[in-house]
Image (tube, rainbow, N blue to C red):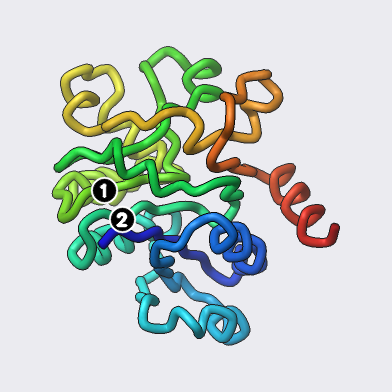
Amino acid sequence: MKAFLTGCDSNTEWQLPWFIKNYQKHCNLPLLFADFGMTEDALNLIAPFAENVVKTPRTGWFSKINALEHYSRMYEAVCWVDTDCQVLSDPSSIFRYTEKGKLTMVKDNPWSTRRPELGDWYNSGVVAVEGVTPMLTTWKNEAAKGNYVGDQEALHGYIAGDLMRRISTVAEAPHKYNVLRLDLLDNNVPKNPVIMHWTGQKGNLEIRKQMTS
């Protein structure tokens, strides 16, 4: 069985109704949750999925790695999707691109263009794994060094400047599975995007606009 996974704390749980609505409109695969410190209201909202909720100790930006590790032991393949991602069509075809032992991710084109000095960046808003993936532990250990502001930076720090390490770590998925807000500004949106990732404060404004329209 394959599944999708998301998670949040009390600061971003307001996105859940919007996220769940978009997901259920386009996908029938199980939707799993990681509780990083949600309020009782949010937990009541996801009560229909109660059997699919894991309470993960909150570790800042690195919580999703723990959640992926947990569920990768239970499912054939799992794909994490941030709650600020808008599912526009069925995302389940991303599992065609998973490879054993690797993190399936989309190249972060805006960051790769703006900060090219250490090679390609990969955006951690959408991450798929196939079964138990030791690379998740490697990623978590790198993040735990405390030298990074987020999980994406930790992964980049691990693979930057080492082509063979990058090849053995990341299985690249097509751009359409994680189209960033900055891709809109860069006029770099692929045909038929599957997931639109509304990053940052400006992205939050767009999400709120959609929720009230």
Q: Secondary structure at mark 1?
A: strand
Whether residue 20 is situated above or below residue 132 in the rendered picture: below
Lateral position of residue 112 relative to residue 85, left or right = left
Residues at discs 1 and 2 in contact (Cβ within 8 Å): yes
Q: Quadrant of residue 161?
A: top left
Lateral position of residue 4 relative to residue 37, left or right = left
Can you identify the residue that label 1 sits on? Answer: 129
Which residue is depicted at the point 48% across and 57% down? 27
Q: CA distance from mark 1 to mark 2?
A: 6 Å
Which residue is depicted at the point 58% across and 25% down? 191
Residue 18: % across, % down? 66, 62
Amino acid type shown at disc 2: Val
Can you identify the residue that label 2 sits on? Answer: 78
10 Å crowding of disc 1: few (<14), some (14-19), many (20+): many
Which residue is depicted at the point 51% across and 85% down? 47
Residue 22: % across, % down? 61, 58
Q: Quadrant of residue 50?
A: bottom left
Q: 23 and 120: which one is in front? A: 23
Lateral position of residue 131 relative to residue 170, left or right = left
Residue 153: % across, % down? 40, 36
